[in-house]
Image (cartoon, grey):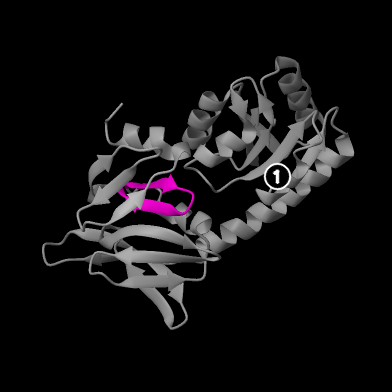
Amino acid sequence: MIHAIIVDDEVTGVEVLRLMLETYCTNVSVSGVAYGVEEAVELIDRLRPDLIFMDVELKNGSGFDILERLQHTCHEVIFTTAYDNYAIKAFKKRAVDYLLKPIDVEELKAAISVAVGRLKVSNQMVASLPSKEIRDETGTVTNKIGFPTSAGVVFLVPGDILYLRSESNYTGIYLNDKSKLLISKTLKHVATCFSGYNFLRVHHSYMVNMNEVIRYVKGDGGTVVLKSGEKIPVSRAFKTTVMTNLNLL
């Protein structure tokens, strides 16, 4: 079953899409509905849906604003809108499809089929990152995550990682011993491996171990300073989330 969320600021639009899904797409279950940007960000990060049906123009922002602020990135997006002038931007965000209202049933079913295929590939990629447990001299068990490199798989303790940086189609993993590991997976993909650890997306290009943060410097988006002295930029889209995590709000 595909768990989905509908984001639309018009009640009629929500109900029409929900009915179409219940009638023609029984492999999709609507887990929640959001009518605005703030509500959508909170709901998506909390429920972690597989699929988001996203309207573009909302009363207090846009669907693109929501995507920029999400911590949960392991999902697919189908835009559903009455406006045809955002399609190029939507596909640059790797949207599954861009459906114009009133939504055609066959187009909806085709878009969901593509989303299902993408989700299967994504799940296989996540499963391809191995993990193992290690036990220290005190008997404490720590999980390690395996990251594929050109030389094989390197297992790392999440606590040894300072931050991760997007480097095109690669991700740089920066460690507290000043070394760096470069892996051939995107930051969006690698980020899914850190669920349950105190890592936070602070910028489109950066994910930080929040246990290493000692200071937040105000600015347009701001900057977080790590124990190592390194300064990581915070984008405006993630500023509220970062400040909330640091108990600054």
Q: Is residue 189 above or below residue 196?
A: below
Quadrant for residue 172, please give it: bottom left
Snapshot quadrant of residue 179 = bottom left
Residue 145: give x, y in percent of width and height.
37, 64
Residue 97 place in picture, x, y as percent: 76, 45
Residue 156 position in % (x across, y down): 32, 67
Rendering coords of residue 16 (x, y %): 78, 22
Q: Which residue is at a point 78% across and 45% down the rendered structure image?
A: 111
Instruction: Confirm whether residue 77 shows in the render.
Output: yes
- Answer few, some or many: residues within 10 Å of disc 1's Cα (few below 14, many 20 plus, some between 14 and 19): few
Screen quadrant of the C terminus:
top left
Magenta segment, which residues? 198-209
Q: Is residue 181 above or below residue 27?
A: below
How many numbered marks does the figure carry?
A: 1
Residue plotted at (57% across, 40% down): 67
Direction from residue 1 to residue 81 in the image, left or right: right
Mark 1 = which residue?
Answer: 89
Q: Is residue 129 visible?
A: no
Which one is nearer the viewer's eye here, 236 or 169?
236
Q: Residue furthest left?
A: 138
**60 to the left or right of 202:** right
Secondary structure beneath disc 1?
Answer: helix
Residue 227 or 116: which is nearer the viewer? 227
Residue nearer the viewer, 228 or 220? 220
Quadrant for the N terminus, please.
top right
Residue at image point 32% right, 36% down: 245
Q: Residue at point 45% right, 76% down?
A: 149
Q: Amino acid at mark 1?
A: Lys
Query: With 9 as the anchor, is 205 left or right in this view?
Result: left
Most frequent secondary structure within the magenta stretch? strand
Determine which quarter of the picture holds residue 123: bottom right
| Magenta stretch holds residue 95 | no
